[in-house]
Image: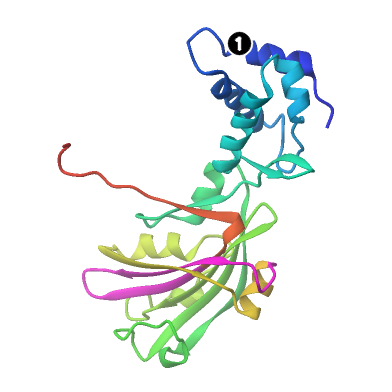
Amino acid sequence: MLVDTAALAREFEATGGDGTPVYERIKRVIGARIRTGKWAEGDRLPSEHQLVTALGVSRMTVNRALRELADGGTIVRSMGVGSFVAETKAASPLLEVRNIADEVQRRGHRHSTRLVSLAAEDADDRPFAADSMTDRVYRSVIVHFEDDTAIQLEDRLVNPAFVPEYLQQDFTSFTPNDYLTRVVPLVRTELVIEAVLPTDEQAALLGIEPHEPCLQIRRSTWSAEGLVSVVRLTQPGARSRLEGGFETSGAR
């Protein structure tokens, strides 16, 4: 990648004057270039030697900035090869039930789905069905894409008593999450999160290798009347992360 070292130096100089440590200023410049798209995913960063020469700082300072950017997941470093802009990971909210389409669009990307199956099945045939599920359930299997990359496999069981028209929905136009939150008020959610290796079928649907680790989230949701849905979300580990937080009742 050709680097305009003069522009890089100007951007670095513009971060000075407020007492910020030099290595943090370098991180700011690199981070800003990545956020604004000047350096895209997979782009190779200038070498340590190029940064030292362009910015007029020590190699130790440059090394610390790059090391901390790598620790934070902004870049990826390969010994003997160089540093590269890391792939953007899809962030999944840990403590809230959100629509994945909204999350993708909020990141400025395009969401799309591929409907694998939509049918009625016996609950006993599904290994992740809850004990309180009815004997007969509706099941949807959907692959979610961010731009052209598969980021989540959604395997969902739904209680027909609460959503009798589930099988008639067009889940290529909107998501099951969007539909369920519109037709059934949800009052309770439980989560189980595991690191797993995908099955051959899951790997094929996600376009990954069977040995690639995944995050798997089993989420159960209830209305005031009972269990509405159990969904198993499988996400390639290299393409996703979980986010969450909470507030205590008072500071200590």
Whether 138 is drawn above or below 252: the answer is below
Image location (x, y in percent) of residue 79: 74, 45
Nearest the viewer among 170 and 145 is 145
Question: Which residue appears at 69% of the width and 43% of the height?
Answer: 77
Q: Say which quadrant the C terminus sits in.
A: top left
Q: Say which quadrant the N terminus sits in.
A: top right
Q: Give the range drawn in magenta.
A: 207-233
Nearest the viewer among 59 and 252 is 59
Determine if residue 50 is in view: yes
Question: Which residue occupies the extreme right position in the image?
Answer: 2
Image location (x, y in percent) of residue 230: 39, 74
Tag 1 residue: 14
Q: Quadrant of residue 236?
A: bottom right
Whether 195 is drawn above or below 41: the answer is below
Amino acid at dot 1: Ala
Per the image, is 210 magenta? yes
Image location (x, y in percent) of residue 161: 32, 81
